Amino acid sequence: MYNFSYFKEKDRAAILDFVEHNPFAFLTGSSASGHQVATQIPILPVMRDGDLILQGHIMKRTDHHKAFSENPNVLAVFTGPHAYVSASWYSSPQIGSTWNYMSVHVAGKMEFMTDAMLVDFMKKLTLKFEGGNTHSPTFYDNLTDTYFNKMLPAIVGFEIRADKIDNVFKLSQNRDEKSYLNIIAELEKQGGNSLLMANEMQKRKEGLFPPGSTWDPNQFDS
C-alpha cells in the first residue's frame, strides 16, 4: 500500500463510512498451496464489540471457496472514486502527472456462517440494497420456497473480523493551495468519477489550507 502519512485518513469514522458507501469489495487470498484467488462481491459491514465485521456470501465449489476453506487469511479491498491528475494543472508543472484515488484495505480471517446465520444475513443484505423496502418482490421474505431450496445450498455465508485496517486517500494533499484549487476546477469540468474526486477534495480544502496558514513543501517526503 502507498504509505505516506499525508495520504492517510486518520478519522476512523470516515474510514468506516467509506466502507459502508463503497460495498462492492475485491476479495483476495490464496489456497494452502499458494494458488491466488480473487472475487468481487457486495459486503455488509457491521460493528460488534467495537470490531469491524465484514459479512458476505460466495458460491460454493468455486476456486475462491476452496481456497478460503483451506486458508482463511483474506484481504478485502474497498475502492472509491479515482481520477487522472495532470501535472499541467500545478502551479509548477515540470514534474510527473499522477492519479488520485481512495482505497481501504481490510485484512482478517474468514469464518463460514451456519445456515441460520446465512438466512439472517441474506435478509439484512437484501433489505439494505432494496433501500429498506420490505414490499420489494426481491426482499428475502418475499421470495418463494422453490427459489430458496435451489439457491441456499449453492452459496455459503462468511464473516471476516478485521485484524488490520489500512487506507490511502490520495487527494493531492501534497500540493500547494493554488494547484489544489486548480485540480478541483479541472476535475469538476470532467464530471463522472472526476467530479466525485473533486467533491472529496472540496471537503478537505479548509483543513489543508486554514486562513492565514503558509504552505510548506518541506513537510512532504515525496
Image: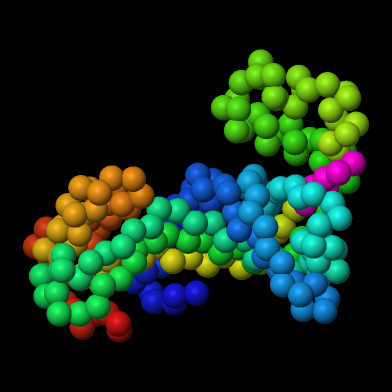
**Spot occupied by residue 138 in the image (x, y as percentages of width and height):** 69, 24
Residue 48, placed above or below residue 73: above
Task: Work out whether residue 39 or residue 116 is closer to the camera in this orientation and state it.
Answer: 39
Q: Residue at x 20, y 47 (%)?
A: 189
Q: Is the residue 21 above or below the residue 27 in the image?
A: above
Number of marks? 0
Q: Residue at x 65, y 29 (%)?
A: 127
Q: Is residue 210 visible?
A: no
Q: For the C terminus, which image quadrant?
A: bottom left
Q: Viewed as shown, does residue 72 lie left or right of 212?
A: right
* Residue that appears at 34% across and 71% down: 6
- Where, by quadrant of the figure, is residue 89 drawn? bottom left
Q: Which residues are magenta?
A: 153-158
> In the rendering, at what x and y percent does residue 84 appear?
31, 62
The residue sitting at the top extreme is 135
At a point 11% along the width and 75% down the height, the residue shown is 92
> Is residue 149 found inside the magenta-colored segment of the image?
no
Front residue of this view, candidates 136 and 214: 136
Q: Is residue 90 visible?
A: yes
